[in-house]
Image (cartoon, rainbow, N blue to C red):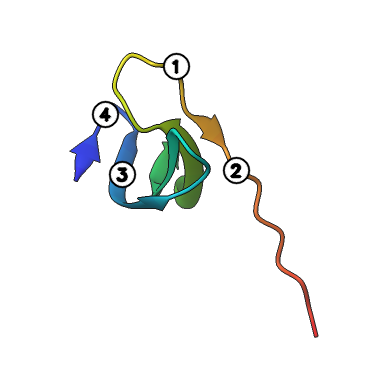
Amino acid sequence: MIGGCSTLASSSAPAAPGYMYVTGYKVYPFIGAKPEIWMCPDQAGKGECTLVEVTEVGE
C-alpha cells in the first residue's frame, strides 16, 4: 500500500508494456474519498501516473 497526502494506492495489475494499473482512493475536499484507477510507469522516475476514466455501461 502506498499513500500520499490525499491519495492511497492499494493494488496494481500489469497494463501495456512498461506500465501498470494502480487502484486506490483519492480524497476530495467536501466530497470525501472516491475510488480511482491510474496508469503508471512500472519503474520509479520514468514519468507520472495518469487517471484512467472508467465508464459504467448498462445492459
CB within 8 Å, label 1 to label 2: no
Question: How far apart are the two marked residues, 2 and 4, measured between alpha carbons?
Answer: 19 Å
Q: In the image, which is nearer the foreground, mark 1 or mark 3?
A: 1
Rendered image: mark on residue 4:
4
CB within 8 Å, label 2 to label 4: no
Picture coordinates of residue 24 (x, y %)? 37, 49
Asked if residue 55 lies left or right of residue 51, the reply is right
Q: Residue at x 45, y 36 (%)?
A: 19
Q: Which residue is drawn at 47% across and 28% down?
A: 49
CB within 8 Å, label 2 to label 3: no
Q: In the image, which is nearer the foreground, mark 3 or mark 4?
A: 3
Asked if residue 12 lies left or right of residue 34, the reply is left
For mark 3, what is the residue? Answer: 9
Q: In this view, does 44 lie above or below 30?
A: above
Question: How far apart are the two marked residues, 3 and 4, measured between alpha carbons?
Answer: 9 Å
- Closer-to-camera residue (20/50): 20
Looking at the rendered structure, the secondary structure element under dot 2 is loop
**Circle count:** 4
For mark 1, what is the residue? Answer: 47
Q: In the image, which is nearer the foreground, mark 1 or mark 2?
A: 1
Looking at the rendered structure, the secondary structure element under dot 4 is loop
For mark 2, what is the residue? Answer: 52
- Of the residues under marks 2 and 4, which one precedes in the sequence? 4
